[in-house]
Amino acid sequence: MNPQTTTPSAASVSGPASSRCIHRMPSGRRCRAEAVDSRASFCRRHLFGSASRYPDPSLAPELLGSLTDFQSASDVLAFLSRLVIRGSRC
């Protein structure tokens, strides 16, 4: 009988890789920076820099205006027009 050897998988090995930022570049490479703390998944750059990529939730009044419900095609058109105008300013 040959004894079977087991090798630990990369996921079960703890080490410096586990405290790295999990951001992936468009090329698929992983960010090499250290995560902000043990509970964070991203480095300081990707954790705080990502806020500028996502719209502010307080944009609802600007986009909706006086609309409370989409009851007609003109309501949808008004909303989409505001959305396109807002998106072009970013």
Image (cartoon, rainbow, N blue to C red):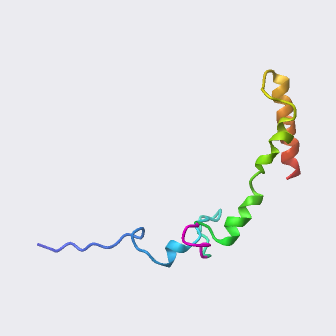
Camera-side residue: 84 or 35? 35
Question: Residue 27 appears at what percent x and percent y?
Answer: 63, 64
Q: Which residues are magenta?
A: 34-40
Q: Which residue is at a point 77% across and 51% down the rendered structure image?
A: 55
In the image shown, does 67 or 26 lie closer to the viewer? 67
| Pick the front one: 51 or 25 | 51
Count of numbered circles on the image: 0
In this view, 55 is above or below 34: above
Residue at image x 74%, y 53%?
Answer: 54
Quadrant including the N terminus: bottom left
Residue 77 picture location, percent across and down: 84, 29
Question: Foreground: 65 or 3?
Answer: 65
Q: Residue at x 37, y 69 (%)?
A: 9
In which quarter of the view is residue 38 placed? bottom right
Which residue is painted at 55% across and 67% down in the image? 39
- 32 on left or right of 53: left
Q: Is residue 17 magenta?
A: no
Q: Is residue 82 above or below residue 47?
A: above
Q: Check the image and name the residue furthest to the left.
A: 1
Q: Is residue 36 left or right of residue 75?
A: left
